Image (tube, grey):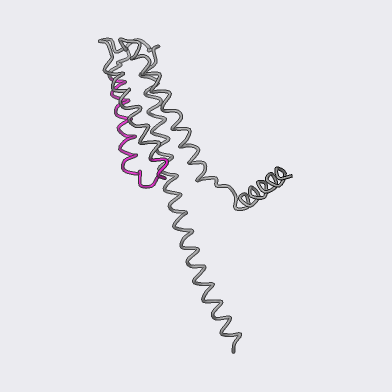
């Protein structure tokens, strides 16, 4: 009789434990899936901003290009980036949000100053205006690289056995230093 009771208790505890672990796993799988979708879309929008800003700030423009139209395209795609970020920032990690929050004014203010410095032909009048174009391009790429790294970390997490191996490696290094 005692073995039957022990088996029933073990079964009940196993079922409840399995339910809790499985439920938690599903929750985090969905969270990571949504985070990956948001980061992928942000990377896509950053690539579009980079493309349009590179076209706008390029000093070698083909003839007949309407620079004001290019500036409007940059403004439109930057607005899409900001709107998408604001509506999906809840899915991102706090450190990712901090990076993007820092990035947005670092690009929007110089971009506005760059466009404000245009001559009637649509080119910057001053050397500061030309420097702003270079500054804007330099700000976009690092953030995009960081977002891609985060995306890859979600898609390709280290295997479960990697952490104990790193601890073992650290212990071996520590033991060597003690000698």
Q: Residue at x 31, y 18 (%)?
A: 114
Q: At 30% from the left edge and 38% from the top edge, which residue is drawn?
A: 83
Q: Is residue 4 above or below residue 56?
A: below
Relative to 162, residue 100 above or below:
above
Q: Is residue 130 magenta?
A: no
Is 166 displayed left or right of 42 in the figure? right
Q: Position of residue 61 (x, y in %)?
A: 38, 12
| As drawn, 63 above or below 86 | above
The residue stretch that appears in magenta: 69-97
Q: Outermost residue toward the front?
A: 179
On the image, the x and y values in percent for residue 169 come to 67, 46
Count the marks. Answer: 0
Q: Where is residue 175 drawn, in percent x and y? A: 71, 47
Quadrant where the image shows the C terminus? top right
* Quadrant in which the N terminus appears: bottom right
Magenta stretch holds residue 91:
yes
Q: Residue furthest bottom?
A: 1
Q: Is residue 151 left or right of residue 61?
A: right
Assign the magenta stretch its main secondary structure.
helix
Q: Position of residue 75 (x, y in %)?
A: 29, 27
């Amino acid at each position: 009789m005692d073995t039957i009771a022990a088996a029933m208790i073990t079964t009940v505890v196993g079922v409840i434990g399995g339910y809790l672990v499985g439920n938690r796993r599903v929750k985090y799988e969905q969270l990571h899936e949504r985070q990956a979708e948001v980061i992928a879309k942000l990377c896509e929008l950053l690539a579009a901003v980079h493309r349009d800003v590179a076209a706008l700030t390029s000093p070698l423009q083909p003839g007949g290009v309407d620079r004001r139209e290019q500036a409007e395209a940059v403004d439109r795609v930057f607005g899409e980036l900001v709107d998408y970020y604001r509506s999906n920032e809840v899915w991102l990690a706090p450190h990712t949000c901090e990076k993007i929050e820092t990035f947005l004014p670092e690009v929007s203010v110089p971009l506005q100053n760059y466009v404000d410095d245009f001559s009637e032909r649509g080119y910057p009048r001053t050397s500061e205006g030309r420097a702003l174009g270079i500054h804007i391009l330099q700000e976009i790429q690092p953030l995009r690289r960081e977002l891609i790294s985060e995306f890859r970390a979600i898609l390709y997490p280290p295997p479960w056995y990697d952490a104990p191996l790193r601890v073992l490696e650290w212990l071996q290094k520590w033991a060597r230093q003690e000698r």
